[in-house]
Image: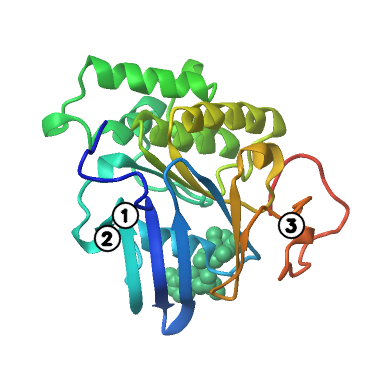
Amino acid sequence: MTHPEESVSEPVISLRGVRADLGSRPVLRGIDLTVNHGEVVALLGANGSGKSTAVRSIIGQVPLAAGEIRLFGTDRKAFRDWARVGYVPQRTTAAGGVPATVTEVVSSGRLSRARFGVLRKSDREAVRRALELVGMADRAKDSVDALSGGQHQRVLIARALAAEPELLIMDEPMAGVDLASQEVLAHTLEEQVAAGTTVLLVLHELGPLEPLIDRAVVLRDGCVLHDGPPPKAVGQHALPGHDHVHPHEPIHTGLLS
Ligand SMILES: Nc1ncnc2c1ncn2[C@@H]1O[C@H](COP(=O)(O)OP(=O)(O)OP(=O)(O)O)[C@@H](O)[C@H]1O
Ligand SMILES: [Mg+2]
């Protein structure tokens, strides 16, 4: 999709002085963050440092107390072009609600593109492709209730991919996904990036994604602590602000905290 009115020099995401309070607590305390066209940026930091809140503020789920967010050069409050953005939320323990099939969940990623909510052949093909990419095509007709946590996560990633977004925002996409599937997803992401997709990822460790990351932004206590090359050997132990709440023997399952 071309948007000739925009220049590629305009950041895809721009946060300036962003503050947000949740439950009367300041959670974001003046965040500056820029993600440029085609970049892959990792958002890192200890539990509770504000990563998910920052990402949710970008997609309009958290009100700002101060500051400004721009998406594709447009103020977030005026931004309507959500078909250009794919979002994978941080995994929660319970899905809740009416059980849907894998295909239904992934198809919901196409709805912003589908006219009058009717999926066409091209939409169904995009859904099938996305399920193949994450290795879940054989479960297409199953209820998501019948999936394991990692399989469910892969379905959420497929939903974001099915939208064929220009900007992909993922909050800990690798959490609970086994190493083999992480590598499949890293490869999938690599293809998206090669095709020009811009990516903002919340991560606890770079893992198989490390070669793809252009820049890392590390949050601590609602502030940006580091913005630059990814820290070397980022197990989360290497991160400033790592708060040592889990056993120190590294467990190489790829399971993140
Ligand atoms: N809805 C809410 N109401 C009140 N406080 C909240 C809410 N959501 C998050 N917080 C608080 O905001 C802070 C930042 O939370 P956030 O989820 O952004 O952290 P995070 O960096 O994503 O952590 P994690 O690595 O555990 O996912 C935490 O102290 C959290 O308790
Ligand atoms: Mg989080």
In the visual, does 116 lie left or right of 112?
Answer: left
Identify the residue under disc 2.
76
Which label number is shown at residue 71?
A: 1
What is the crowding at mark 3: few (fewer than 14 residues within 10 Å), some, or many (at least 20)? many
Which residue type does callout 1 highlight?
Leu
Query: Which image quarter is the N terminus in?
Result: top left
Cα separation between marks 3 and 1: 29 Å
Pick the residue in front: 153 or 30.
Answer: 30
- Provide the secondary structure element on which disc 3 rests: helix
Nearest to the eye among marks 3 and 1: give it.
Answer: 1
Residue 194: image x %, image y %? 50, 28
Task: Residue at 37% x, 37% y: name it.
Answer: 99
What is the crowding at mark 2: few (fewer than 14 residues within 10 Å), some, or many (at least 20)? some
What is the crowding at mark 1: few (fewer than 14 residues within 10 Å), some, or many (at least 20)? many
Task: Residue at 43% x, 24% y: name it.
Answer: 130
Q: Contact (CB < 8 A) between labels 1 and 2?
A: yes
Query: Which image quarter is the C terminus in?
Result: bottom right
Residue 118: image x %, image y %? 16, 26
- Provide the secondary structure element on which disc 2 rests: helix
Identify the residue at the far left of this view.
116
Which label number is shown at residue 196?
A: none
Counting residues from the N terminus, which is met first, the one under dot 1 or under dot 2? 1
Cα separation between marks 1 and 2: 6 Å
Does 180 appear above or below 33? above
In the visual, does 167 lie left or right of 212?
Answer: left
Locate residue 109: give its quadrant. Answer: top left
Which label number is shown at residue 236?
A: 3
Cα separation between marks 2 and 3: 31 Å
The quarter of the picture showing ligand 2: bottom right
Which residue type does callout 3 highlight?
Gln
Task: Residue at 75% x, 52% y: name it.
Answer: 234
